[in-house]
Image (cartoon, rainbow, N blue to C red):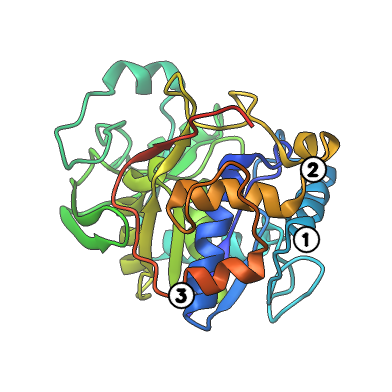
Amino acid sequence: MKGRFAPSPTGYIHLGNVWIALLSYISTRNQNGTYVVRMEDIDLQRSKRSLGEALLDDLEWLGFEWDEGPRVGGPEESYWQSERFILYDKVLNRLEEQGLIYPCFCNRARLQSIASAPHRGEVVHHYDGHCRDLDGFTVAQKKLEKSPSMRIKVTDSTMDFNDIYQGPQRFVLRQGIDDFVLRRGDGMYAYNLAVVLDDISMGVTEIIRGHDLLETTAQQMYLYSTLHAEPPCYGHAPLLIDNDGHRLSKRQKSITVKELRELGWSPERILGELAVLAGFIPKSDAPSISLESLLIYTAHTKALHCEHIVLEKSI
């Protein structure tokens, strides 16, 4: 099997990131799999190469070792998404030739006006199929005024899968309503397209990520089906939240590994705190464990079936 950790270098790595890296690393290593690190710097406005390098520094300091990715290489030409646009172009052109995608000229104001709240088990709806059946002449005229986004033509589909952490899942995609964007009007590729193409190309068979990305899975599974590829096994892990109920994230200015290092924390102490939260090791006043030792403790660990875990104390 092959697992991966794919962070976005838009800030310094924080404990929420390390939490997901740890869970994916343990799962991959305990299955004797290949571990991949990939930098999802597709957002060229927010991502910075320097932050990506700092992120890699922190991962190495914590004890993570990867088999494929930046600094170690592998069968892929690059493990930075910003250097993989040729692949995305090629696939998008092929989908357009097959009539599976179409240009959309709707602006943000219109899209916001038609958005509706989804029913349980349905993907959040953002569209009404307005540009789905435009004729060639109309498309050509509109392209003179505006660069379109590119949407995939979704057919009515039900996506069922058994999530490692959340159990059986079912999502409904409906024709037209759930046509989602693969490339924006400004030329930026959508997360759903890039992540699926990269995971297919890199042979990823298991994806451990945060619970907040659960509802993107249906769209990604639809892409796998469209591309005639086998989807991976998904695990949407519980998120770390603070005492106020906020998930740890860059926007919440969560504690970063950089800050903890400057405060004199050791890798073992950081990993120990996270291991206690996961129930990997007994709770104690000063947990401390290396990543190598943690793999031994977790050889037969079961998944955490919940949506979030509270980081009870400020560390």
- Find residue 73 and report its horizontal and vertical position in percent: 77, 75
Residue under numbered circle 1: 60
Residue under numbered circle 3: 299
Q: Nearer the viewer, mark 1 or mark 3?
A: 3
- Disc 2 residue type (three-letter): Leu
Q: Badge 3: few (under 14), some or many (20 or more) residues near its Cα, within 10 Å?
A: some
- Disc 3 residue type (three-letter): Ala
**Disc 3, SS:** loop
Residue 30 drawn above or below residue 61: below
Q: Nearer the viewer, mark 1 or mark 2?
A: 1
Q: Residue at x 50, y 59 (%)?
A: 23
- Find residue 223 and report its horizontal and vertical position in percent: 37, 61
Judging depth in this view, the residue of 93 and 21 nearest the camera is 21
User: Do the CB atoms of the residues marked 1 and 3 lie less than 8 Å apart?
Assistant: no
Judging depth in this view, the residue of 310 and 160 nearest the camera is 310
> In the displayed structure, does residue 122 sit left or right of residue 285?
left
